[in-house]
Image (cartoon, rainbow, N blue to C red):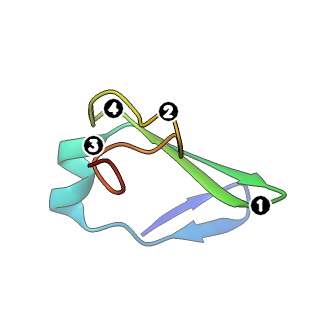
Amino acid sequence: MYEIEGFTYIVDKDFMDKVKPIKIEFLDTGFKLTTGMDLGTPCSSCDTARSCCS
């Protein structure tokens, strides 16, 4: 568990070691996570990597 600016985040330790640093932003449409892990080039249609690309 990590407490930052009044928020508590629960992150699996092994996962954190693989992806750190993690940046979490709250947007009008939800949350945006930015990590140190390279997920490849995002899709042009949905701006995600490896989740909706065909």
* Vertical side of 52 occupied by 47: above or below: above
Question: Decide: marks 2, 3 in contact (CB < 8 A)?
Answer: no
Rounded to the nearest whole Å, what is the CA distance between mark 3 and mark 1?
Answer: 23 Å
Q: CA distance from mark 1 to mark 2?
A: 18 Å
CA neighbours of label 1 inside 10 A, class few (<14), some (14 to 19), many (20+): few
Name the kind of residue labelled 1 in the image: Thr
Give the CA distance from mark 4 to mark 3. Answer: 5 Å
Give residue 33's position: percent from left, percent from top. Answer: 52, 49
The residue under label 1 is 29
Mark 1 or 2: in front is: 2
Q: Earlier in the sequence, mark 4 or mark 3?
A: 3
Q: Residues within 10 Å of mark 3 (few under 14, many from 20)?
A: few
In this rendered view, identify the residue nearer to me: 29 or 34: 29
Q: Specify whether 4 is left or right of 5.
A: left
Instruction: Tell us which disc is closer to us: 3 or 1.
Output: 1
Q: Which mark is residue 36?
A: 4
Of 15 and 27, the residue lying toward us: 27
- Whole-angstrom CA distance, mark 4 to mark 2, is 21 Å
Determine the secondary structure under disc 4: loop
Which residue bears the numbered disc 3? 19
Image coordinates of residue 40 in percent, x first then y, are 27, 30
Which residue is tagged 2?
A: 44
Q: Secondary structure at mark 3?
A: helix
CB under 8 Å between discs 4 and 2: no
